[in-house]
Image (cartoon, rainbow, N blue to C red):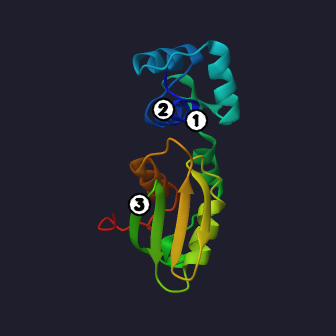
Amino acid sequence: MKNRNERLMEIRRLIASSNISSQDDLMKLLLKKGYELTQATLSRDLKYMRVAKMPNDDEGYVYILPDKEQSIDEPEMQASSFGVLVSIDFAQGMAILKTLPGHAGSIAYNIDHLNAYEVGGTIAGDDTILLIPRDGVSKSDLINMLKVRLPGLIREQVH
């Protein structure tokens, strides 16, 4: 049986990648992926994740993730305003982000204030950030979240 964090991440991926208009549709997609859950559990998960519905021309109403909605309203945080990453490395399930000297604090502040599900927290020094992801969050999930939520922060050559 897959754990709750894996299930929440899969729900997040499904909602982000397709127009899902009902819990029944979402439940069927989750069952295909091997997640066994009740409608009540799915409802609690959606409430916990603060998933909302938004009008869609093709589907009527579709589920959206709260951070996508917030990123429309938030002033856009471009890398030019707080520096760029020099490198990203992973150890023991955590990400080590190297920045230009003096930029780690502002980048960590912006990451913390994204309120992204993937991020448990950050610790920043002068040019290094320790990013602690939540259980079940993969390296690619973390990198993709940073690319989407902080455009320009990650240059393509940084892995």
Quarter of the figure that contains the C terminus: bottom left
**Helix, strand or loop at disc 3?**
strand
- In the picture of the structure, the residue carrying the numbered disc 1 is 64
How many residues crowd mark 3 within 10 Å: few (<14), some (14–19), many (20+)?
Answer: few
Q: Amino acid at mark 3?
A: Phe
Q: Are marks 1 and 2 in contact (CB under 8 Å)?
A: no
- Kindly identify the residue that appears in the image at 48 percent across and 25 percent down: 58
x and y percent of residue 132 in the render?
Answer: 56, 57
> Which kind of residue does numbered mark 2 sit on?
Glu
Residue 84 showing in the rendered view: no
Instruction: Measure how far apart labels 1 and 2 are at the Cα level.
Output: 14 Å
In this view, the mark in front (1 or 2): 2
For the point 64% across and 69% down, the residue is: 109
Question: Does the image show residue 92?
Answer: yes
Q: Residue at x 41, y 60 (%)?
A: 90
Q: Which quarter of the picture shows residue 23?
A: top right
Q: Helix, strand, or loop for circle 2?
A: helix
Considering only order in the chain, which callout, 2 or 1, is on the residue closer to the N terminus?
A: 2
Tell me the tag on residue 90: 3
Structural distance between the alpha carbons of marks 3 and 2: 22 Å
**48 horizontally vs 31: left or right:** right
**Tag 3 or tag 1, which sits nearer the N-term?**
1
Residue 118 screen position, x and y as percent: 55, 48
Q: Which mark is residue 10?
A: 2
Classify mark 1: residues with Cα within 10 Å, few (<14), some (14-19) or many (20+).
many
